[in-house]
């Protein structure tokens, strides 16, 4: 099964869409324009206690609303987020890691120097009945 037809990836990209919509709303005001693109990375490893993705990416996508577009894998984990425009960068960074048994997803994003979050979702159910649920309210906010 490829990522396009995997129900868990669809739930993760639903979260990406929610972040995208919040940024569009926040960027419509006096905070500066929202990012024009999200750079999304699926990471191989995570520090679940500190809620940080780490190591090398195994997949990359760009997102501008709609469907995520796969992009070539490149070495290094530092994405070029472009210039700061108000409270946002020109491009936002989203990273996630799915644990081996597919029961948890670490999800982080940084859209500006002080606009980011990291959280762990528990995976409840499977397939069409699957959903992501924040675990214990644990998260970081910047």
Image (spheres, rainbow, N blue to C red):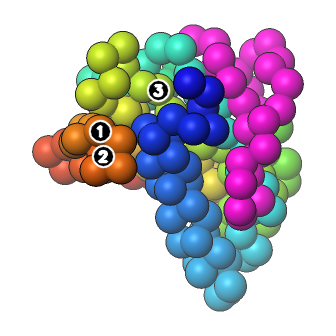
The answer to whether marks 2 and 1 mark residues whose Cβ atoms lie closer than 8 Å is: yes
Q: Is residue 42 above or below residue 126?
A: above
The span picked out in magenta is 55-79
Query: 1 above or below 4?
Result: above
> Who's the residue at 28% across and 50% down the image?
129
Asked if labels 3 and 1 touch by Cβ distance under 8 angstroms, the answer is no
Q: Earlier in the sequence, mark 1 or mark 3?
A: 3
Q: Nearer the viewer, mark 1 or mark 3?
A: 1
- N-terminal-most mark, 2 or 3: 3
Dot 2: what SS? loop
**Which residue is the site of mark 3?**
97
Answer whether residue 71 is magenta in the image: yes
Q: Position of residue 80 (x, y in %)?
A: 82, 37
**Residue 117 vs residue 62, the one in the foreground:** 62
Q: Which mark is residue 126?
A: 1
Tag 2–tag 3 contact (CB < 8 Å)? no
Q: Which mark is residue 130?
A: 2
Q: Where residue 67 is drawn, which disc sits there? A: none
Q: Secondary structure at mark 3?
A: strand
Report the residue at 37% width, 33% height from top: 105
Residue 90, given in percent of the width and then of the height, sits at 80, 57
Q: Nearer the viewer, residue 82 or 16?
A: 16
Residue 97 pos. (x, y %): 47, 26
Label 1: how many residues lie within 10 Å, few (<14), some (14-19) or many (20+)?
Answer: few
- SS for callout 1: loop
């Amino acid at each position: 099964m490829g990522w396009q037809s995997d129900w868990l990836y669809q739930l993760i990209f639903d979260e990406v869409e929610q972040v995208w919509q919040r940024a569009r709303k926040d960027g419509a005001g006096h905070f500066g324009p929202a990012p024009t693109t999200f750079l999304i990375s699926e990471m191989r490893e995570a520090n679940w206690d500190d809620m940080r993705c780490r190591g090398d990416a195994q997949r990359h996508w760009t997102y501008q609303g709609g469907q995520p577009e796969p992009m070539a894998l490149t070495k290094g984990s530092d994405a070029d987020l472009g210039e700061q425009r108000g409270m946002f960068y020109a491009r936002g960074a989203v990273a996630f890691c799915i644990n081996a048994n597919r029961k948890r997803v670490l999800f982080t994003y940084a859209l500006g120097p002080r606009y980011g979050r990291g959280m762990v979702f528990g995976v409840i159910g499977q397939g069409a009945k699957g959903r992501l649920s924040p675990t214990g309210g644990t998260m970081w906010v910047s």
